[in-house]
Amino acid sequence: MSGEAGRGLRNVLAGAMALCVMVGTSTAATAAGEGETAVGAVGRGLSKYPYRVYVPPSYHGGKRVPLVVMTHGCQTTAEQQQGANLYDDLADREGFIVLYPDVNPIEVNQPGPLKNCWQFPLPTSWLRGAGDPKAIAAMTNSVMNHWKIDRSRVYMVGMSAGSFMTSIMAAAYSDIYAAVALNAGGGYADGICLGIPVGIPVEASALLARRVMGPRARIVPRLAMGGDVDQGVPPGCVDKALEQGLRTNNLVLGRSQTSPISLQPASTREVPATEPGHYATTVRTYLDPAGCVIGERWLIHGMNHFWPGGSSDPIYKSFTDPKGPNGAEITWDFLKRYRKAETSPPCSEAQEGEASN
């Protein structure tokens, strides 16, 4: 991107966004699930962000349900992410709603690998109340206002660039998202980690994230997932993303980045491949001082830059690798442990039975 184009994007993304809400419903079931998909948008003109909402057939508006916000990567649309990742089928079974945010027209028309890409490398996208974070929060609030959502059980998941945005949202809007999960993405303000495994020091990234939380600071549990041969986002970036989350949580609790939550895993387990030709996985689990799960790292052996275990439909072969474990199941099993008001000492997890549907 040229310097002039970059300055233009900064000016647009830093400008005030007049938000509006438009919601329409498609009566046809999606290819992935048995429910319905609604479409909507926030903003206007070059700052208009469309989105899709998957509503499972079990939803009748009588009971508040969880919300999962699934944010796509570069060169991918919300519609493609919806078809690829198998979240709709899982939502049918578990009874939650899925929001698929999309980018604005400027981001759609960026050149080459930046097409359809969130502006996570720009400092204007690291803050509350500006650019992409403001839009994603507005989309989330729109869904929470339109459907009966359990506001204590709103989660965010990202793929690639969407994971960088998820790290940003966990800091800038920690008052919305109870817990987050990243696939093939990096930590807060660490866009330069792409292709440069060093990037910003993790201590600085953690401190910046804590500062942007401000008075809304709270513990945000985090899962980080990705392949060990990822050629798009180095596995070291994903390691740093998890560590940044743990360090920021420590800063929420006190002055130290390295305690009381240990930066060392409490346990490591090997998950074998489910069938020949598929990938095995190493899982590291991190606990808070009370012994509750506060972080996980899933390293998928042999997988490149893909969503793991998604649709086997050939139209999604650029986005998913069905030989991986089911990423939707992995992330949901982690996220559903948490309620926003309860991710605090002594135990980060909700009480037994409260976090499940």
Image (cartoon, rainbow, N blue to C red):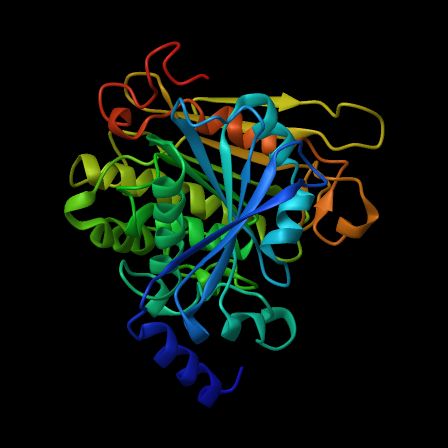
Q: Quadrant of residue 67?
A: top left
* Percent of width and height locating residue 123: 34, 68
Residue at image coords 38%, 26%: 64
Residue at image coords 63%, 49%: 81
Question: Can you see residue 228?
Answer: no
* 293 lies left or right of 104: left
Residue placed most toward the observer, 263 or 43: 43
Note whether 11 is above or below 61 in the view shown. Answer: below
Q: Quadrant of residue 324?
A: top right
* 108 lies left or right of 309: left
* Percent of width and height locating residue 292: 35, 19
Residue at image coords 34%, 16%: 291
* Percent of width and height locating residue 86: 66, 36
Note whether 89 is above or below 101 in the view shown. Answer: above
How many labels, in total?
A: 0
* Percent of width and height locating residue 354: 36, 14
Note whether 289 is above or below 230 in the view shown. Answer: above
